[in-house]
Image (tube, grey):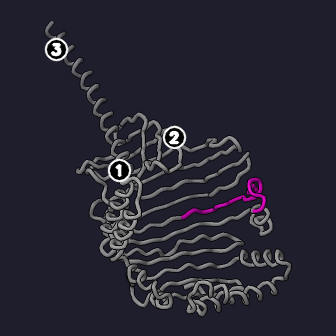
């Protein structure tokens, strides 16, 4: 009898232990999604997760609803009625978490009824997820939340016809050292390849714009978007070496910028200022002025090293000149000569006489032979944003302080 009781007691203890383990797993899974919601809540997102379960180091969540916290955002909550799988989850000493990846099943759904909208997106994965612990999420942590995002092909249909698609999307960041409170620097890249857009349906909503698109041969465009950036935390040296929109048979637009002083401390101050603005209710004129002064004080340590916007034509500029020439009843050569003759007066309307010599010669050269046009800012030495704002009182001096140059048909550096 005693033996039977002993065995029964052991069995009951085992059942109780299994139950307790199940409860602990559920609590750990819930703690993870709660922390996820808290971290992204600090960035302005309101996330409600479905039931979460833990199996080893994998947490599975039954869908989520995401909305913006800003009351006047004007956007509807987005509900993801699908299984979210966080793999390689581990808890950090500060109460935060890491996850090797988040995978989301392929999406194939309708999102509108009139006209019918259909979206499909495959191979969705986020990797190297970082959720810092603590009561607040510092700015330096918000830069490190995701190591990489990638997807396969995207396709968006309108009444059964594909209006936009891409072949692949990949955004990735490398952190030195690994994600955590001691970040020294980071580098990031973005690549959206094989973009195709069908603009032929624009005319159904806006006949005038649709006619222009068709006349310019823009009903179907294809291209890629890429970006490359590095960022040092100690001196806030942010260098965007490429942000390129490259579309075949149209043209390529590339933006670059190099600034210093964009440190985590500066980001923290901006975050605090924005939070105070959001919590302050209606903004009076005095409050707006105070916020502007505060913003200027924050920007005092931010300096511009250089920046540029470069356009390389691949046919679009010629199409535009031909189109507007035809609209005016002139041939292209006559239309260009008319534009060049009017250009000095157009620039003079800015009230900055010194701008004429900067703008008119290169723009005239581009109109004659549309190859490339680049606007560059290159101060003689890194110049504080506040110094530039003060120099704006003397526009001619500002041009010199900025090192403003416009070039046409020059090789890219």
Q: Is residue 198 above or below residue 30?
A: below
191 horizontally vs 188: left or right: right
Q: Earlier in the sequence, mark 3 or mark 2?
A: 3
Residue drawn 29% across the image and 49% down it: 96
Quadrant of res 314 = bottom right
Residue drawn 30% across the image and 65% down it: 183
Which region is colored magenta?
191-208
x, y percent for residue 229:
45, 71
Q: Secondary structure at mark 3?
A: helix
Residue drawn 63% across the image and 86% down it: 347
Residue 409 visible in this rendered orientation of the protein: no
* Image quarter (top left, top right, bottom left or bottom right) of the C terminus: bottom right
Residue 33 colored in magenta in the image:
no
Which residue in the structure is indicated by mark 2?
79
Q: Earlier in the sequence, mark 3 or mark 1?
A: 3
Which residue in the structure is indicated by mark 3?
6
Which residue in the structure is indicated by mark 1?
39
């Amino acid at each position: 009898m005693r033996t039977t009781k002993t065995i029964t007691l052991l069995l009951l203890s085992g059942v109780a232990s299994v139950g307790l383990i199940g409860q602990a797993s559920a609590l750990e899974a819930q703690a993870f999604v709660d922390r996820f919601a808290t971290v992204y809540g600090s960035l302005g997102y309101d996330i409600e997760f479905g039931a979460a379960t833990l199996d080893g180091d994998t947490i599975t969540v039954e869908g989520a609803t995401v909305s913006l916290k800003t009351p006047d955002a004007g956007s509807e909550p987005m509900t993801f009625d699908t299984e979210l799988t966080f793999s390689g989850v581990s808890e950090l000493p500060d109460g935060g978490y890491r996850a090797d990846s988040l995978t989301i099943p392929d999406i194939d759904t309708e999102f509108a009824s009139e006209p019918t909208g259909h979206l499909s997106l495959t191979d969705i994965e986020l990797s190297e997820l970082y959720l810092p612990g603590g009561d607040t999420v510092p700015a330096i942590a918000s830069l490190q939340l995701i190591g990489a995002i990638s997807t396969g092909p995207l396709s968006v249909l309108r009444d059964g016809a594909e209006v936009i698609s891409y072949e692949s999307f990949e955004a990735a960041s490398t952190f030195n050292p690994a994600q955590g409170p001691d970040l020294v620097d980071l580098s990031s890249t973005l690549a959206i390849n094989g973009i195709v857009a069908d603009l032929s349906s624009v005319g159904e909503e806006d006949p005038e714009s649709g006619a222009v698109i068709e006349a310019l041969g823009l009903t179907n465009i294809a291209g890629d978007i890429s970006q490359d950036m590095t960022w040092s935390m100690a001196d806030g040296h942010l260098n965007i070496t490429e942000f390129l929109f490259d579309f075949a048979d149209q043209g390529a637009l590339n933006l670059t910028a190099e600034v210093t002083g964009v440190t985590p401390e500066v980001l923290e101050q901006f975050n605090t200022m924005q939070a105070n603005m959001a919590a302050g209710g209606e903004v009076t004129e005095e409050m707006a002025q105070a916020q502007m002064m505060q913003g200027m004080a924050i920007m005092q340590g931010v300096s511009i090293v250089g920046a540029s916007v470069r356009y390389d034509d691949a046919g679009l500029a010629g199409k535009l000149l031909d189109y507007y020439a035809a609209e005016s009843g002139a041939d292209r050569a006559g239309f260009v000569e008319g534009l060049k003759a009017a250009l000095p007066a157009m620039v003079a309307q800015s009230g900055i006489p010194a701008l004429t010599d900067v703008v008119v010669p290169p723009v005239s050269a581009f109109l004659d032979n549309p190859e490339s046009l680049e606007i560059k800012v290159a101060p003689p030495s890194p110049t504080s944003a506040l110094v530039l704002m003060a120099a704006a009182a003397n526009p001619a001096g500002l041009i010199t302080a900025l090192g403003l140059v416009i070039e046409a048909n020059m090789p890219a550096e």
